Image (cartoon, rainbow, N blue to C red):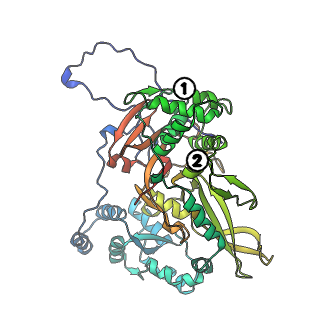
Amino acid sequence: MFICCKSNKKPKVVQTQTQTPPQQTQPKQSKYQIRTSNDQDQHSTNLTNMEGTNDKINLSLQEIEKFILHDKKTLEQERELVIKLIELPDKTHLIEFNWAIAYTNYIKDAGIQPGEIKNRILYDKIKAKEELVLDKDYVLVNDQVWNVLVNIYKGGPMLTINDLDRKSENNLLDQSLKVFASPSMNDLDKKQAKIRNLKQMPIKELQIIGLENEIYFCYLNSVIQCLMGIPQLNYHFLHQYSNDCRPFSYAYSILLKKASKVHYKARLVAKELIKVLQKHFSIYEMHDSSELLLFILDKFKEEIYVNNAPQFIQPEQCQFKQSLTFIDEIFYGQLTSFIKCSSCDKISQHQDQFYDLSLPLVSKNFMQRKLTISECLNNYFKEEMIEGEWTCSFCNQKLRNIKRRVKITFTPNILVLQLKRFQSFPQKKKIKEPVTANMELNVKSFCIPEVVETKYELQGMIVHSGSIDQGHYVAVVKRNQNFYLFNDDEIERLSPNQINQIDSAYLFMYRRKSD
């Protein structure tokens, strides 16, 4: 399903002689503004005027202790302190989930006091070696928040993630994976060795340009700007295509050639690519930029083949081999799911390739703080129960309530992450949960031990503003060590503080980080 937007283009106004004195002239403002809080989803916060707040909380231990010991502290003071402390990193302490919800309601609405912290429930479950689920059985807070809450409300006992680790022998799947060895892992190492790292590929930086939007093309323009921010991809298309026998690749290469010859902030129209795209779907209707990105990459793959490329074994047909394309070298990743049979103790595995990961948005969390991409990934890769009946491929036993763990067994050079913001069932809506991007990302904990290149840095984002039925797409892309907001034909340079405040993006691109 394609979901996109109405263009926010406005009719051009004829300028007349101004009556405003020179000293009262207003500075130029961007026509598009990115939402930075969860209670709005409109073009209302001007990036150019955004001061921002310092995310680093400068609170000393003495100040926290002074608050705890103060006899006449108010609920407003407590709310202000806890909200500040909740954003600090290193969340290691467990708090029972229902108590956390009761406390959140109390601190927000000054309702019923939650009473003592009920961590005894968690303690008994851990002692009985029951599996605890984050944001269902417990929430995680940092040491500072725990100290404040336990001193005010008492209760306990204190539990940390180390207490969860002590029961890990109950998780047979995780224990088995730690010592799991298979010929397929060795094969994987050989495949990785044949794929070039980004730093081994020639690059071509393009001029920073705007893309005109005549009607509903903001979804296309945002995708193009993200792709043009990959200099290895630019070089490939600029030096490989000189004829029109491959229509998608040729149309895109024409656009890149134009972009490499114009001046800074020039305006272009991707008319050749639009002409090719309209043969495959109704390009003048509203569409989704994430699905369009995968569509374009798939068309590139159909047209491009690298000579003497390494061979990949398709997981669904082990005897079939397909040449690796340059698109695969950039975007290809592999997931492997592991299931341990409780009857024969053998582990079944299944490989799936991916060019993006579609991450679910978890429900409201403790104190409703903003999620990060790391937390969304953690939710995606957590162990899950298989619904229905499962048959072991080794012993043919039919079992229920089987646990499955998914790991990355092949990391891509460019990691594309998409948030599931658009929901069709049970009701059609856009999920507006605020999510901030990690400027640097390490996916080591989501990979098998053999995968060593796991560090990434933010390369770009696509931000959607509006509802599920209409809205507007813009791209935020890193070019020449700086981030730029590409709003069709308008371009604005963003500061690191402005990047940190964007919480309404729905597609992220991460570039493999070179050590």
* Amino acid type, label 2: Ile
Identify which residue is drawn at 65% across, 72% down.
183
| Amino acid tagged 1 | Ile
Furthest residue toward top: 17
- Nearer-the-camera pick, 410 or 401: 410
Q: Left or right: 361 with respect to 500?
A: right
Q: Is residue 321 visible?
A: yes
Residue at position x 59%, y 83% in the image: 170
Residue 49, numbered label: none
From the viewer's perspective, tell me whether residue 394 is left or right of residue 161: right
Residue 60, percent across and down? 23, 69
The answer to which image quadrant residue 153 occupies is: bottom left
Q: Residue furthest front?
A: 308
Please, which residue is most extreme toward the bottom here?
Answer: 127
Front-lying residue, 152 or 404: 404
Q: Residue at x 76, y 60 (%)?
A: 319
Find residue 154 and report its horizontal and vertical position in percent. Answer: 37, 79
Q: Secondary structure at mark 1?
A: loop
Nearest-to-viewer mark from 1 and 2: 2
Q: Which residue is mark 2?
A: 327
316 displayed left or right of 289? right
Q: Which element type, helix, strand or loop, lies under badge 2?
A: helix
Q: Which residue is mark 1?
A: 215
- Viewer-nearest residue: 338 or 119: 338
Question: In the rendered image, which quarter contains the N terminus?
Answer: top right
Pick whichever of labels 1 and 2 is earlier in the sequence: 1
Disc 1 versus disc 2: distance between alpha carbons? 29 Å
